[in-house]
Image: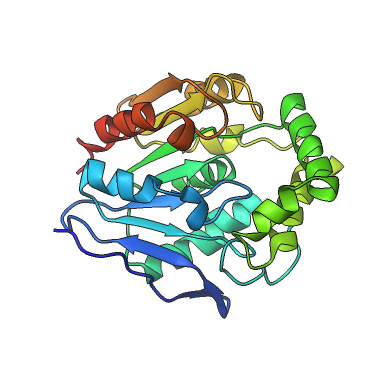
Amino acid sequence: MTGARVEPDVRVAGRRIEALELPGDPDRRPLVLLHEGLGSVGLWRGFPQALHEATGRRVLAFSRFGHGRSQPPPQPRTPAFFHTEALDVLPDVLAQLDAPEPIIVGHSDGASIALIHAGRHPVTGIALLAPHVIVEDVTVREIEAARERYASGDLRERMARHHDDVDAAFWGWCDVWLDPAFRDWSLEADAERVACPTLLIQGVGDPYGTLDQLDRIEARVRGAGGDVFRVHVPGGHSPHLEAAAETLAALRAFTEPLV
């Protein structure tokens, strides 16, 4: 059962959240997409539709506060941002979208949020694309470079096409990652709480993180009966765009048995 694109009315703390729904098989758990640090519903580009066609499942996506067409966050972000999104905002959004125990597909910051959520809430599975569980030197260097491009290059102009409040989107991401208090951030303890099927995907040329991120998750996530799968694909930080065929094939194989 499929249908046309729907834009559900979602509000958290009285603020509007941009959301997308692609209706699919009502008897199978939905796929919920959590975007990267500078992402939004629109910046998933054609991936939600491709994932919907590959799996036949209902696909849901939303833009976090300050991203895309969502309203700004109610207060400035702090290093507690990931846990707030995973444990306060995401459960509220899932309830409004009628999406219990979903399969969460998270990219970058969204993957970190998915990991935290899965350790404390029932999910059918998680697929983590370019996830972060520690702050690496390469990550900091790349974000510092992005800050320079935003201040003096064309990054702000390009981002402004996709975000109503481009400064909220960029600085809310950049300032958290470059906060000195964030340098010792780790989700390894959160990973140890996860006991659902888990798929890890990373581009071998990812400038924002090394394969050590996957090593640390794989060593700690228990999965369901040890079901932790790992896939390396060509390209950089956006496997769903840079290695779309390989990423979709891995997601299709991972989700097929998850009823």
**Residue 183 visible in the displayed image:** no
Position above or below: 29 against 130: below
The x, y position of residue 85, in whole percent, is 58, 57
Q: Quadrant of residue 27?
A: bottom left
The x, y position of residue 63, in whole percent, is 53, 60
Position above or below: 50 against 249: below
The x, y position of residue 229, in whole percent, is 37, 24
Residue at horizontal 75%, vertical 47%? 154
**Residue 226 visible in the displayed image:** yes
The x, y position of residue 10, in whole percent, is 45, 73
Residue at horizontal 33%, vertical 34%? 248
Residue at horizontal 73%, vertical 25%? 138
Horizontal placement of 243 versus 39: left or right?
left
Position above or below: 157 against 203: below
Horizontal placement of 194 versus 76: left or right?
left
Residue at horizontal 72%, vertical 38%? 185
Image quadrant where one finds the N terminus: bottom left
How was the colour assigned to the protein in this rendering? rainbow
Image quadrant where one finds the C terminus: top left
Position above or below: 4 against 121: below
Q: Quadrant of residue 16?
A: bottom right
Q: Please tell me which residue lies in front, 226 or 247.
A: 247
Q: In the current view of this chain or complex, which residue is farthest to the bottom? A: 14
How many numbered badges does the structure rendering display? Answer: 0
